[in-house]
Image: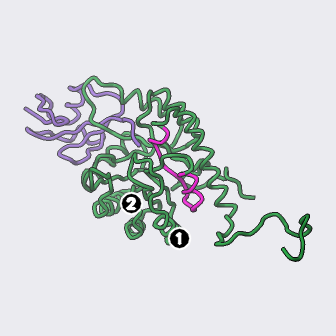
Chain colours: A purple, B green
Amino acid sequence: MILLINDKPTETKAQTLAGLVVELNIEGAFALALNQNFVPKSQYANTLINENDRIEIVAPMQGG
Amino acid sequence: MTTNNQAWLLADKQINSRLLIGSALYPSPDIMRQAIQASASQVVTVSIRRQNSGDQSGQAFWQIIQSLGCHILPNTAGCRNAQEAITTAQMAREIFGTHWIKLEVIGDDYTLQPDPFDLVKAAQVLIEDGFEVFPYASDDLVLCQRLVDVGCRIVMPWASPIGSGKGIMNPYNMELIRQRLPNTTLIVDAGIGKPSHATQALEMGFDGVLLNSAVALADDPVKMATAFKHAIEAGRFGYEAGTMPQRDFASASTPVLGTPFWHQNH
């Protein structure tokens, strides 16, 4: 299915957020929002993803 | 005896420095690290952005920040409504492991002036969710009061627009906010351009100053960080010492009694 990850259409075979994180090989400090709602890491395994879901994956950066 | 190095409480943390410093816009990561250390600040602001595949720069940055041992104050820069800011704050809390959030909700792209309505709305939701909210506000007394009303223990009115370096545009407003919110921790955030601006804020009784561009964009950021450290200490010391009242007439400081060549008919 196709997801919008950080606003880019992305093909995935993952069924859950946990599977998606493994598939994308995301490491280090990051957090995730599904359809504009924050999802804590503890819920990745139980959170199903669906066609056209919008996923934001964010990491630390400089800020003022 | 009060000293300018006296520890103070920022939210639930006891700290010594009254300078909160940003981590953006430095010429290099190493100059950022040196400048933050030179500033003696114990609170560093950071942000979050979309993670691009294969880009590890954010992780490298985060390792440098962690090595400094400062308290972390993540921001919600770039958010334009309450929902974006709330979700960003929740993501930042998980990434950085802190319930502190510098809440920014921008209402105007040209001035980066906060949206007062969504700012208050987001502040209320985040406080109910357990956050310590540091709201970036304009110098509007009623906005600052509303933020206190919804539970903010800290309010951060701007001196002038972010990155403008103009200093305190409206001293009357700022002094009024200080007078009317005596029990709120007030940090001047944004618009500070040079050390004397920071001194002025501390002399007014503000509890601290948050700045970034003034140090990062200086010709020598490390030296400017040192200058701000001293300027903020000077301002706080001056505030604690109590300034003399202004007068509309001259008053000689040198005693006139026994002045040589003095005659009655002078």
Task: Output the chain of dot 2.
Answer: B
Residue extending farthest front:
B265
Tell me the quarter of the image containing the C terminus of chain B.
bottom right
Q: Which residue is drawn at 33% across and 55% down?
A: B113
Residue type indicated by callout 2: Ser
Q: How crowded is mark 2: few (under 14 residues within 10 Å), some or many (20 or more)?
A: many
- What residue does disc 1 label? B179
Rendering quarter of residue B259: bottom right
Q: Please state which of residues B234 and A12 is positioned toward the viewer in this rendering.
A: B234
Residue B165 percent coordinates (x, y) = 44, 47
Residue extending farthest bottom:
B265
Using residue A22 as the reference point, say whether residue B200 is left or right of it. right
Q: Residue at x 92, y 67 (%)?
A: B258
Residue A30 percent coordinates (x, y) = 32, 35
Query: How much space separates mark 1 and mark 2, taking CA atoms?
Result: 16 Å
| SS at circle 2 | loop
- What residue does disc 2 label? B138
Residue B254 percent coordinates (x, y) = 82, 63
Using residue B176 as the reference point, say whether residue B106 is left or right of it. left
Q: What stretch is highlighted in magenta?
A: B197-215
Does A21 sit above or below residue B169? above
Residue type indicated by callout 1: Gln
Rendering quarter of residue B200: bottom right
Q: Is residue B166 magenta?
A: no
Nearer the N terminus, badge 1 or badge 2?
2
